[in-house]
Amino acid sequence: MEVFAVRKTSITIVIMIMTIMLSGCGKNKSEKINEKELEIEQKYGIEIEKVREEDLKVISEYFAKLPDGFVEELKTYQDYEEYQDRKIYIYVSGDGVTDVKNDVSRGDYWILNNNKEIEDQLAYCTMESVSYNISYRKKGTNLLHAWNRYNPWIYDYSDDKEYFKYLYNEDNTEEAYFIGEEPVLYAMDDEARIFALLMTEDEKGFEILDKAPNIRKKAFYIRNMMDYAFETVDETAYWNRYFTETKWCIQGRR
């Protein structure tokens, strides 16, 4: 599994991307790269811009892994009935960032780096959109606040160098809580990086979960949170493979 650089996009880049995406809404078939792009957009209610042919295949295969109806549920904010036309906008750039910009009324803008693995970034962005979806619910914040229970005692996401001792590497597995430096600093990055582990087909993802018990418990929390928060999710969801195959029990122990 590739560890990719994340954030934080500048205001200029965000405005540029949002302008491009919004100007592309409602494009007809002749303006699309090919029939495949149009098919993906119509099936999932998303908009795609600046995507290479090879990336379209990855995007299609990734969205096919998600539970039926999940994308629609993800982009719909249940407590904001006035914003029922939200979309997910996918923009692939060469700016070296992976990020999600949230607009309550319009949708989420998934910014991907064309120099990194697209699938891992799609998973990363999915989890960030999940976090936004839950945070905008009247009763959703408790789900997110519980995340801190799975961090070191009295942990506060910051740039304190002391916290980098909790980074995962081959020599630090038992005491590891984070995969990369960005998750040490930002809770949303932490959640997203671990969800990407669950979605990857790279054996290294499961290897990390096998070796790092604290990261594994975080992954299990995400699994349970998703099941509770989204009606379209059940035990057959693709990200549940690890727990199904290893027969992990509810306590998070083999």
Image (cartoon, grey):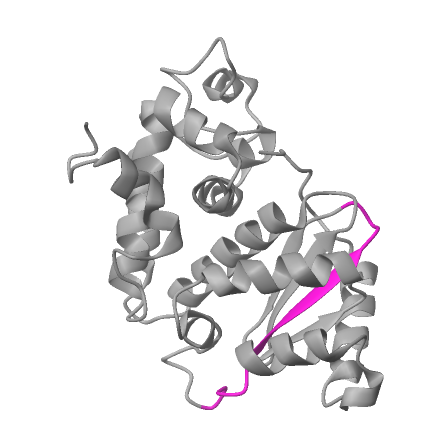
Q: Residue at x 53, y 35 (%)?
A: 202
For residue 198, side relative to residue 232 (left or right): right
Query: Percent from the top left, x then y, of residue 118?
Result: 67, 50
- Do we see residue 151 in this rendering? no
Q: Nearer the viewer, residue 213 or 246?
A: 246
Q: What x and y, as percent, mark residue 94?
A: 84, 51
Hey, which quadrant is residue 1 in on the image? top right
- Check the picture and name the quadrant holding the C terminus: top left
Q: Which residue is drawn at the image coordinates 66% and 37% (left, top)? A: 4
At 32% from the left edge and 70% from the top edge, which residue is drawn?
A: 232
Question: Magenta part of the protein: which range?
Answer: 82-96
**Vertical order, 225 against 38 (above or below):** above
Relative height, residue 224 to residue 32 (above, below): above
Location of residue 20 by image quarter: bottom right
- Residue 187 magenta-drawn? no
Residue at 46% from the left image edge and 20% from the top image edge: 166
Q: Is residue 8 visible?
A: yes
Percent x, y of residue 140: 31, 64
> Does the magenta portion include 88?
yes
Is residue 73 or residue 40 the one in the foreground?
A: 40
- Judged left or right of residue 94, residue 248 is left
